[in-house]
Amino acid sequence: MNTLHLLFTKDGLVYQISKNKNVLEEKSFLSSEETPENFISEKLDEILVKQRYDEVSVLSALNHFAMMPDSFSDHESGFDLIAYNAPVERDSEELMLSVNKKHSLQFYYTFPKIFYTKIKDLSIPVRFNFSGEKFLNSISNKGNKEIHINLYHNQCEFFAIDDKKIILYNNLDVNSEVDFLYFVMFTLSKIGFGIKDTQFFVYGETTENETFISELQKFVKNLRIVFDNLPRKNFILN
């Protein structure tokens, strides 16, 4: 079975083509001031017609989201909840929902309609998910105070967990690795996590964000790099 995996980030798109869990092809595209305005959309068009796929798996790491308990059922207010975190354009965004049964949480998130329509027009099975839900399912925690950080290009998402309870999740667009560090440390002070008794786990683009890692290590003793996104081994897509 040929599966197309797509990961959308703040300013990028990563795709993998796999067959029976073997990665055949992988590539990343990052938009910048030098790239055309519709760069990511055009690259998505190229990817969708590269070959015939049996299914598509879409993962959104865009930071238009709201985390709620799974008992919350007023789905009509999803856009309003997301609007507390980020500007919402209802005419151009599709409201989506991802449920994490293990932790009794659900994530409302929006996904650009232009991308949604192009993918659905393939008329093959498509699975949509939010990166926070996928990341949370990938985490193993032991019941201590823990911070789990997943790094992207110019982006960071993290969970604060205490005694296996989710205390906080956030997904940030930032322009420097120092900004990553500042916000994480600021968050610790607000939720009462002490540096000495908190375990830190880092995943994702750790090589690209090595300045963040080295700066974090100056303050944190209990730090472990769990995954580095090596080519064809992007853990959150697998």
Image (cartoon, helix red, strand yellow):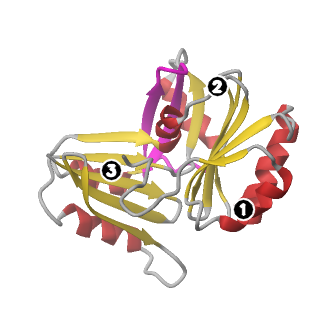
Q: Could you tell me which secondary element the residue under label 2 belongs to?
A: loop
Q: Amino acid at mark 1?
A: Phe
Tally of marks: 3
Observer-nearest of 108 and 61: 61
Q: Quadrant of residue 85?
A: top right
Q: Earlier in the sequence, mark 1 or mark 2?
A: 2
Q: Earlier in the sequence, mark 3 or mark 2?
A: 3
Residue at numbered disc 1: 212
Residue at numbered disc 2: 142
CB atoms at circles 1 and 2 under 8 Å apart?
no
Q: Give the image location of residue 15, x and y in percent.
A: 33, 60
* Residue 160 in view (yes/no): yes
CB atoms at circles 3 and 2 under 8 Å apart?
no
Gap in angstroms between the C-alphas marked 1 and 2? 25 Å
Q: Give the image location of residue 1, x and y in percent.
A: 14, 46
Residue at numbered disc 3: 116
